[in-house]
Structure formats: C-alpha cells, structure tokens
Amino acid sequence: MTQPLNFTLRADELPTHWYNLNADFPEPLPPPLHPGTREPVTPDLMAGLFPEALVTQEMSVERHVEIPQEVRDVYALYRPTPLLRAVRLEKALQTPAHIYYKYEGVSPAGSHKPNTAIPQAYYNKLAGTRRLATETGAGQWGSSLAFACSVFGLECNIYMVKVSYHQKPYRRLLMQTYGATVHASPSRETEFGRRQLAENPDSHGSLGIAISEAIEDTMKHPGTKYALGSVLNHVCLHQSVIGEETLRQMEMAGEEPDVIFGCAGGGSNFAGLAFPFVRRKIKEGKNYRIVAVEPASCPSLTQGELRYDFGDTAETTPLMMMHTLGHAFMPPSIHAGGLRYHGMAPMVSHCRKLGLIEAVAYPQLKVFESAVLFARSEGIVPAPESAHAVAAAIDEAARCRVENRKRVIVIGLSGNGLLDLAAYDTYLSGHMQESGNGN
Ligand SMILES: Cc1ncc(COP(=O)(O)O)c(C=O)c1O
C-alpha cells in the first residue's frame, strides 16, 4: 500500500476563527507607545492608517476572532493548504526523524502573505477605502496585496525595496498583472524617498525606508489607507490559520511534533504556524521546541536588543517593544528579501522573552545548500526565506541521525521560490556571497 504523505483537510474544515495569543500570554504584551508623548497609543492614532475593524483586532485580547464568510470564500481558493511528510528528504538525510512541512506556496501569490492580505483588503473595502499603500521586500507581500485588492476592487500602490525591484522583476510584473502600481524604493514619489536619494543616490533601499514611504503616501492621499504585511498583532492573528490547520493535520498523521521551525522576517509566518502550538504549551503543558530561524546578516531575534523602537526609518510609526537591530539598520542585500527587516513582531519578541520559543540564525550559503537538497528530494523549490526553516530542520534531522533518535519535525514552508530562480542561479553558478547578492 502507498504510504500516505499528504494530509489534506476537506474544504469544510477551513478554520472558522483566527486565534489570538494575546488572550493567553502569562504576562500581557507591552503596548505600543505614541512617539511624541510615550503614552500607550489610542485607537484614534491608528485610525488614520487602518480601518476600524483592523485597529480593534490590533488591540484585541479576544481569544478567537470569527473569520468573515467573504474572507473564507477567498481563502477557499487555496486553503486548507497541504501538510506533507518529507520521506524523500528523510531518506536523503538517512535520518530516523520524521519531517513534515506545511506548504503555503499553493496560494495565488506563492506564499503565506495572502492570509492577511485578503482580510486587510476586505475590511478596507467595507470601511469605504478606495486605495491601499504598502511596501514590499521580495515582492511576496506586494503581490499578495495586489491580488487581494483586485479581488475587492481597490487600487494598490506599492513601494518595493530597490534591490528586490531589480533582483525580482517577475514579482514586480505579477503585482502589475494584478493591477498594482509599483515604485522602486527609495523613490521620487515621496519627500522621504527624495531625501534618501539625495543622501545616497545608490541606496539599495530597505523595508524600513519603504514603510516610511508608504505611510507618507497614505497621509497625503485622501481615500488611502496603509497595509502592513507583517509585524503587527492583527497580521499575526490572520496568519494563525496556518497553525490551526497544522494542529489538525498532525492529528491526521497521528504524530505530535517535537520541534517546529519557521523562518522569521517580521515574524508573521512564524507566528501563524507557531502560536496555536504555543497555546498548547501554555494551556496544556506541551513541551514542543518552537524555533524561529532568521538570516545571520539580519539577526534581530538572536542579536538585537529587546526595547522600544520605531517600525520604520523615518520614525513615523508608534514605538513597539520588540527585538531590534535599530531602525536605522541597513541589512545587506541578501536574496531572502522578505527577511531583511530590522525588528521582530512584538508578539514573537514577547514569546522569546517568556521562553516560549527559541531563535537561531543561518548564513545565506548554508540556506541555499539546504534549499537545493530540499528541491532535489521533495520537488518544491523553497522561497529563499522559507529555506531558512528548511536549513534548521535539516540540521535537526542530522542530529537525530547522530543520536539515532526519532524526533518529529515540522517545517513552515512559507512559500515557493519559482520567482526567485535568479537567486538559485547565483548560488548554482558559485557567485553567491555570504552577505550580499553576488550579482
Ligand atoms: C516566503 C516568505 N516567507 C517568509 C517571509 C517573512 O515574512 P514574515 O516574517 O512576516 O513571515 C516572507 C516575506 O516576504 C516571504 O516572502
């Protein structure tokens, strides 16, 4: 009999609620602060940027938030997503470990990002917003928001980090195909962008700069709101569908994870996979190891300080309590563009502080070596971001081999790398450097 490898939920098993870890933290999350007064921010400060429903979710401590039917109808295009057992990878590694991966690359944009883009566009449409402004690194978030805006009939204006704009022309084209307008950031569209270009005409850009541009754009264009693809509480909330499905799929597979790996840039994919498992740690005393994997060249969780910092370079956002490398940090232009962010989601940072999760950092060459092994065993080419989790899982599986011990490993495979093949070209041709693009 063929061994079952694919643990698929039925369409009617799509989660009906998002899960909010803020309801279960043993210590409450420190609130975001107003940059001027240093007092906790009030909803009216956020109302300029986000529709009311998202501001409410940002501040909510409600445990379960119902997913609107209109959002579930769009989720149904690609959710529930598959959980697969990576038996060919296990064989290649000659490991007694059982390796599973939750694959978000089946979404229209190729990653987990539509899980939040769809509700963000939906709540904006409901509130009468006409246009959304946002930033994107590798273009996974931008293409997800562009897709969601096309579904709900909103205009979409995107500031794409310049290095990725040039490295990933097909993601830009995907955004444009969905109807979005895309600018290389720093751009001439905003005052902040023009200032950056005057100071450094060759700037590669960063997510921090692109966020500042998108916020300035929002403030200057009536009918426009801002959308962020990671970091914030409501984004982590929306991503919880990943972990809720994975819990049920692991039950179908008849196994409990020992170790869970997710890559972490701003932290939303990691949060989405991890938080339902963190809930079980807190409420049921489970002892899963849950590990965030970040790039060695942008190591906010492993090297950054836990303190209040701005989310953007221009110091326009509220101050958030997070692991940060400093909002002026300019990350090297590695290929995992979506992991080049100076800070980490406050909720993920709080988990780390409370000892609920661990963090490790991986260098780029090791990440690509692992990604290629994964592709050759499992067939899926991982996004460079997701490949960070793959690299850490492969090391864990190798430890299992050495110790001759079975452990159950779950990888959050947050996206596919089909539009990142130029990065694979750089790696395969031997031109990749440890902390740059090698192009
Ligand atoms: C495939 C993929 N995984 C992970 C990330 C990192 O973002 P986050 O930490 O918010 O999940 C990105 C960001 O663009 C991405 O494209």
Image (cartoon, helix red, strand yellow):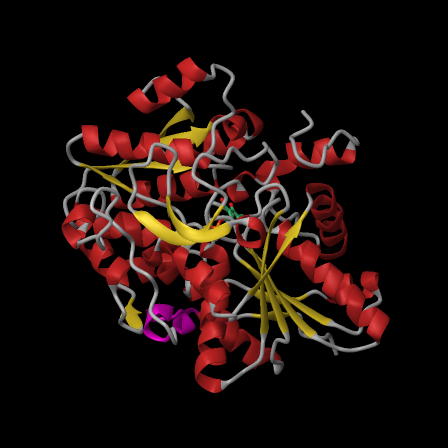
From this view, report whether residue 253 is shown above or below residue 409. Answer: below
Q: Residue at x 40, y 57 (%)?
A: 346
Within the image, what quadrant is residue 289 found in? bottom right
Q: Relative to 257, is 323 on the left or the right? A: left
The one nearer the camera, 94 or 249, is 94
Q: Residue at x 74, y 35 (%)?
A: 427
* Quarter of the N terminus within the rendering: bottom right
* Quarter of the C terminus within the rendering: top right
Within the image, what quadrant is residue 359 found in? bottom right
Magenta stretch in the rendered image: 9-24
Residue 340 in view, yes or no: yes
Q: Relative to 178, is 362 on the left or the right? A: right
Within the image, what quadrant is residue 275 found in? bottom left
Q: Residue at x 47, y 32 (%)?
A: 206
Q: Position of residue 395 (x, y in %)?
A: 75, 60
The one nearer the camera, 225 or 47, is 47
Q: Position of residue 197 (x, y in %)?
A: 42, 17
The one nearer the camera, 252 or 404, is 404
The one nearer the camera, 44 or 156, is 44
Residue 13 shown in magenta: yes
Q: Residue at x 19, y 37 (%)?
A: 130
Q: Which residue ends up furthest to the bottom in the rendered image?
A: 284
